[in-house]
Image: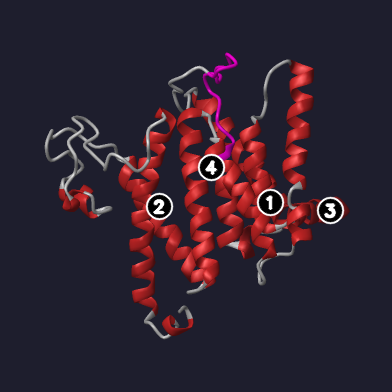
Amino acid sequence: MFDALQDVKPLFVLIYAAFVGACLGSFVNVIVHRLPQGRSIIRPPSGCDHCGRLLQWYENIPIISYLMCVGKSRCCKKPLTFRHIITEVMMAVLMMGVVSHFGLSWRSVLWSSVITAVATLALIDLDHFWLPDSITLPLLLVAVLLPWIPGWITPYQALLGLIPGLLMFAVGFVYQKITGREGLGLGDVKLLAGLGALVGLPSALSILFLAAVQGAVIGSVMLFIGRRTSSPPTVFEDGWVPPARAIPFGPFLVLAFLEVLLMPKIFDGAPWRVVQVLLDAYRL
């Protein structure tokens, strides 16, 4: 099927990828809103955020409906959250990136599914400091099964890709034993393990490095300006409450994964390039 589509005009392919991505973004919005509440992500159909009125099909077109309604509900005239359209645009851009990088292939379909899952995880973690097992565990299972498909990385490479996740678990365990406080959640460990098994050890180390650096930089900025990044609505079952200026690590893992996957020439191998620069500076 994909071979028959290779002659399709590249611009049309990108437009189609953007449309599919926007639709996936709309679905991501539904999951991010409903899953933390324990609601079904399938039924009932999408409704108004304020009064709950079910939306008509023409009110549910990704991006276009938001713009046509000028960011307000048609029934209540109340403002809609801006993140709806941001998520849809983000997913549209990501799907265009996938098709540009992998072409029209089964790999694009698989990576699109993975990106949809991790984008959902990042947004839920950003809101609730929670990476649900209902997404992380299937992601990990898929990551373990895909290497058995010809054309993917080998099962041995996938197994080695789990090492950064195990390393993160060890660091978090030691930190908790020393300080008595949880430094990293198991959700982060499962997420990194799944991402590592998908891309192999070298790329997984790049993901961990980039996530740590970007998280440290943004965390330092947030501490400097004295603002918290989110307001978690619930207290966890074990009584843990995120500190006032805590930043979830999951979004940075996802960001680093997207950077390594879609822009490997720039981001993949980042730790080794940094080490090389430091060695060169030392020799001087």
Instruction: Look at the image and tell me in which quarter the N terminus lies.
Output: bottom left
Q: Earlier in the sequence, mark 1 or mark 4?
A: 4
Q: What amino acid is at disc 2?
A: Met
The local secondary structure at tag 3 comes to helix
Q: Residues within 10 Å of mark 2 (few under 14, many from 20)?
A: some
Q: What amino acid is at disc 1?
A: Gly
Q: Which mark is residue 279?
A: 3
Nearest to the observer: residue 8 or residue 132: 132
In which image quadrant can residue 127 be found? top left
Structural distance between the alpha carbons of marks 3 and 2 = 38 Å
Q: Earlier in the sequence, mark 3 or mark 2?
A: 2
| Residue at the extreme right of the image, as rendered | 283
State yes or no: residue 249 in magenta.
Answer: yes
Asked if the residue at tag 2 contacts the one at tag 3, i.e. Cβ–Cβ closer than 8 Å, the answer is no
The magenta region covers 236-251
Where is mark 2, residue-wise? 90
Where is mark 4, residue-wise? 135
